[in-house]
Amino acid sequence: MSSTKHFAKGSAKPVLPEDGLLRLYSMRFCPYAQRAHLVLNAKKVPHHTVNINLTEKPEWLVDVSPLLKVPALQLVQEKDQPSLIESLIIAEYLDEKYPENPLLPKDPLKKAQDKILLERFSGITNAFMKILTQNTGLEDYWVALDIFEEELTKRGTRFFGGDKPGFVDYMIWPWFERLSVIELKLPQEYNFDEKRFPKITQWIALLKADSVVQSFYATPENHNEFWRTRKAGNASYDLLA
């Protein structure tokens, strides 16, 4: 079961089958929720998705996400059916729980280095929000991206995960899928430089063609329209319904 509709304040809680499947509470255009979708799809883990209107959150969301956050992953087969929140915690849990197609390195040092790299990705996420909310931060974004261009060059592989996408690739991809939103926000200043970022340019093209990314992909036009409506105060959560 996957709801295309986003449940809002006053809506009845959806009745899901008691089939033991994971339940992911999500929002279609949330980059953090997208992380969870990518890992679930990479692992081919059957699950139910319940989309949430984050402007007018349904009252029952607190039952599965006490902090009213998405993504929230409810583990219905565990005692008391606990829920996990925070996208990186959810993603790492899924990678350990479902060992098929491992995404994080098994080597402790390499795993630690990947986690450190993801900590440094906050420079990009912070700059992204600064651009959207303050119309500034574009150069901060490119400077933060330099770190990932250098790391991919250092690793000498097509993906951060090696010869195929891994944990880092799927955790950072959602923000690259939304590059068009930055261009929409700052059309005169936007200046993605393929000469400055040759490895990242190739990486973006490769990820865009990846079957897992394609399984949960929205076009630049979709993202732009969502952000336009969000800025106008009437976010089109059900744009893809």
Image (cartoon, grey):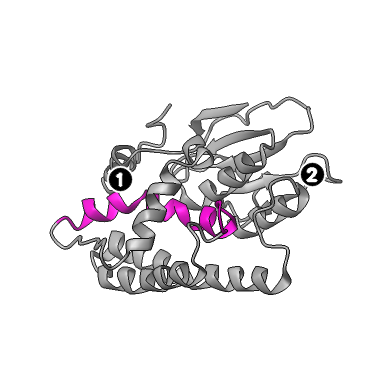
Check the image and name the residue furthest to the right.
79
Q: Which quarter of the rendered picture does the C terminus lie within? A: top left
Instruction: Answer with left or right where residue 224 lies relative to residue 115.
Output: left
Q: Nearer the viewer, residue 160 or 77?
A: 160
Residue tagged 1: 233
Segment tinted magenta in the rendering: 162-187
Tell me which residue sits at (72%, 71%) in the image.
108
| The quadrant where residue 228 appears | top left
Select label 1 or label 2 by which is in front: 2
> Circle 2: is it few (<14), some (14-19), or many (20+) Cα within 10 Å?
few
Q: Is residue 111 visible?
A: yes
**Image marks 1 and 2: residues in contact by CB distance under 8 Å:** no
Q: How many marks?
A: 2
> Magenta region, mostly helix, strand or loop?
helix
Instruction: Answer with left or right where residue 229 lies relative to residue 217.
Output: left
Q: Is residue 60 visible?
A: no
Tell me which residue sits at (73%, 63%) in the image.
106
x and y percentages locating residue 182 in the rendered image: 27, 56
The image shows residue 175, relative to residue 123, as above or below, that is above
Residue tagged 2: 81
Q: Nearer the viewer, residue 237 or 179?
A: 179
The image shows residue 159, relative to residue 50, as above or below, that is below
User: In 3D space, how far apart are the residues under numbered discs 1 and 2 (Cα atoms)?
Assistant: 35 Å
x and y percentages locating residue 227 in the rendered image: 31, 46
The image shows residue 73, relative to residue 113, as above or below, that is above
x and y percentages locating residue 173 in the rendered image: 46, 53
Q: Amino acid at mark 1?
A: Gly
Check the image and name the residue furthest to the left.
188
Check disc 2 and report its element: helix, strand or loop: loop
| Residue 240: in magenta span | no
